[in-house]
Image: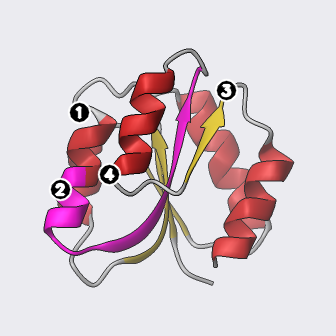
Amino acid sequence: MKPIYVVERDAAVRDSLDIVLRSKGFEVSTFEKGNSFLNAVDRQSQGGLLLDMKLADLKPEDILRELTGAAVQISTIVMGDGRNDALKQRTLELGAVEPFDKPLNIQLMIEFIVRLS
């Protein structure tokens, strides 16, 4: 399976996603900050990205622009609180494939990720 990158500010959510995704056979890399993720990913990276919409250091739009500009082929799911429809729309316009509201429906998200793989 392709790798999954989790960029999430909340350690409990980040760790839970790591455990569940690994139990389903995914190779997982987790990051608390967007800059850490961008420093780790390269142009040949593929897979999936679960991207928190409220990171401390970068906006999700900035991360998506950076990935697009570097021609990185990563399917991105944005995760947020469900109250910011304008931000969700902007991330979809910039290449995100799906928004998921928190609290996350992990089973539904896993099913979606498996379909993307």
User: How many numbered discs, if any?
Assistant: 4
Image: 115 above or below 104: below
Q: Residue at x 22, y 56 (%)?
A: 38
Q: Earlier in the sequence, mark 4 or mark 3?
A: 4
Could you say where residue 110 lies in the image, as x and y percent from the top left? 76, 58
Q: Look at the image and tell me in which quarter the N terminus lies.
A: bottom right
Contact flag, marks 1 and 4 (Cβ < 8 Å):
no
Q: Residue at x 32, y 38 (%)?
A: 60
The Cα atoms of the two marked residues, 2 and 4, are separated by 10 Å
The residue singled out by tag 1 in the image is: 58
Near mark 1 (Cα within 10 A), the count class, few <14, some 14-19 or many ≥20, is few
The Cα atoms of the two marked residues, 3 and 2, are separated by 25 Å
Secondary structure state at the residue bearing disc 2: helix
Kind of residue at disc 2: Glu
The Cα atoms of the two marked residues, 3 and 1, are separated by 19 Å
Image: 46 above or below 14: below
The residue singled out by tag 2 in the image is: 66
The residue singled out by tag 4 in the image is: 94
- Of marks 1 and 2, the one in the foreground: 2
The residue singled out by tag 3 in the image is: 102
